[in-house]
Amino acid sequence: MKSVLLFIFAFGLTTMAQAACKCGENCKCGGEEKCACGKTVNTEEPAEAGHPLRGVVTRKLEDRKLVLVKHEEIPGFMRAMTMAFSVPEKDWPLLEPGVHLTATLHGGRGDWRLSGITLTDENYQPRSEDKKKVTTP
């Protein structure tokens, strides 16, 4: 019985490795970056476009390095709510409670993060005194 299970497990791993190749041929490359059939395997995931977000920082969770942001509705994607986001390390010191921002929202399933953060006034216009602190995506 153990040998049958071992065979099924090994066959499953081989099948998954061949599927990872994405070259359309049964070349047994095992998903290596350079396939045995001579084709290059696409090892990078497609870039995630993200969603524009506007909101205000309500709290910093220092122990988890997360920022709570009360954000507006993201039409067609998410209703308005308060959520925890990870942010780039360089932006961490700038994001204090009460700070308004615009950003790009990425992720899902509990792994939400912000990039391209711009500090703004209450009308979501970039704050002139912070233009040097604005991050890029």
Image (cartoon, rainbow, N blue to C red):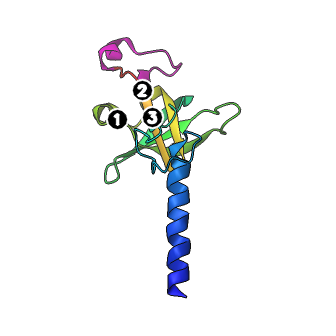
Query: Foreground: 22 or 52?
Result: 22
Quick one: which residue is furthest to the right in this view? 76
Question: Mark 1 and mark 3 in contact (Cβ < 8 Å)?
Answer: no
Q: Position of residue 96 (x, y in %)?
A: 36, 36
Q: Position of residue 34 (x, y in %)?
A: 40, 38
Q: Position of residue 30 (x, y in %)?
A: 45, 51
Quadrant showing the N terminus: bottom right
Identify the magenta region.
116-133
N-terminal label among 2 and 3: 3
Residue 88, label in figure? 1
Residue type at mark 1? Pro
Residue, x 40% and y 40% (percent of image)? 33
Query: Foreground: 31 or 114?
Result: 31
Residue, x 55% and y 39% (percent of image)? 23
15 w.r.t. 3: above or below? above
Q: Which residue is mark 2?
A: 117
Residue 73 in sight from this viewpoint: yes
Whole-Å distance between the Cαs marked 2 and 3? 42 Å
Q: Is residue 119 magenta?
A: yes
Q: Which residue is mark 3?
A: 38
10 w.r.t. 69: above or below? below
N-terminal label among 1 and 2: 1
Question: Mark 3 and mark 2 in contact (Cβ < 8 Å)?
Answer: no
The mark closer to the camera, 2 or 3, is 3
Q: Is residue 79 left or right of residue 66?
A: right
Circle 1: element type: loop
